[in-house]
């Protein structure tokens, strides 16, 4: 079955530590996105990538970094510069062409907690 | 910038009641509009969408009509079930990256 996988489901970060969240898709989608969800709020865009080896900052990129070396993969690193990282992180992807090109499909999410 | 305003929650209904969740938007032009649903501890699932004015999106008994005159995309269902309990997000797509702008979500609880 095609889909988006995120791992781990839960992640714990110590003070001063960098952690990386994985996002993989086998939908052959071109664009990928990272969103952050805080309790009682909508999702906010962290980073996005429309093609391999290219990515752009979203609305809340400070304290995060990404890479896009392969079409299927878009890992997110939460750095020690992110002072309030506790949140639910969601990865999404979409095709860039065709009738369904504006629809984003989401992974199951990773919940990041600070120890 | 673009924005989406959703009806404040939480909303609690009895099974078989009628559901309306209001959603209005502010955007340049006529963006595509979406409703996503999130079950506890899970990611978002696309519920329905509409890409132009007067389009009606529908799925699983839920409906929403794209109204450009009132810049609205209200979600409705004639008879809710306990299994519909979830958080519902209204969203629009915009920008060169086609990113989603979300409302704050509405928690729906359906009691048996």
Image (cartoon, coloured by chain):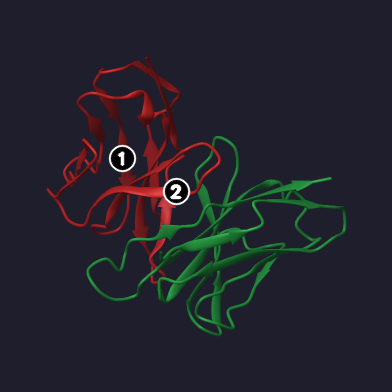
Chain colours: A green, B red
Q: Residue at x 57, y 66 (%)?
A: A23
Q: Which subunit holds the residue at mark 2? A: B
Above/below status of A72 relative to A39: below
Q: Position of residue B20 (x, y in %)?
A: 27, 27
Label located before the other in sequence (2 or 1): 1
| The one of B84 and B22 positioned closer to us in this rendering | B84
Tag shown at residue B44:
2
Q: Position of residue A62 (x, y in %)?
A: 68, 62
Q: Are marks 2 and 1 in contact (CB under 8 Å)?
A: no
| The one of A46 and B86 positioned closer to us in this rendering | B86
Crowdedness of circle 1 by 10 Å Cα count: few (<14), some, many (20+)?
many
Above/below status of B14 relative to A101: above
Above/below status of B49 relative to A58: above
Residue occupied by mark 1: B24
Quadrant for the N terminus of chain A in the image: bottom left
Decide if residue B37 is on the left or right side of residue A9: left
| The one of B95 and A46 positioned closer to us in this rendering | A46
Q: Are marks 2 and 1 on the same chain?
A: yes
């Amino acid at each position: 079955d095609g889909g988006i996988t995120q791992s781990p489901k839960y992640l714990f970060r110590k003070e001063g530590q960098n952690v990386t969240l994985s996002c993989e898709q086998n939908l052959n989608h071109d664009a990928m996105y990272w969103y952050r969800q805080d309790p009682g709020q909508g999702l906010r865009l962290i980073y996005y990538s429309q093609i391999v080896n290219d990515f752009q900052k979203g609305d809340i990129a400070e304290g995060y970094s990404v890479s896009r070396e392969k079409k299927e993969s878009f890992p997110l690193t939460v750095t020690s510069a992110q002072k309030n990282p506790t949140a639910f992180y969601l990865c999404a992807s979409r095709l860039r062409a065709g009738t369904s090109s504006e629809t984003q499909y989401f992974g199951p999410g990773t919940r990041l907690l600070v120890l | 910038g673009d924005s989406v305003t959703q009806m404040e929650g939480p909303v609690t209904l009895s099974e078989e009641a009628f559901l309306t969740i209001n959603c209005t938007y502010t955007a340049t032009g006529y963006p595509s509009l979406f409703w996503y649903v999130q079950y506890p501890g899970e990611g978002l699932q696309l519920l329905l969408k509409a890409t132009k004015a007067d389009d009606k999106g529908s799925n699983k008994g839920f409906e929403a009509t794209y109204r450009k005159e009132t810049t609205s995309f209200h979600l409705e269902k004639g008879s809710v079930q306990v299994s519909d309990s979830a958080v519902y997000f209204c969203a629009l797509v915009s920008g060169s990256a086609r990113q989603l702008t979300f409302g704050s979500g509405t928690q729906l609880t359906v009691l048996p």
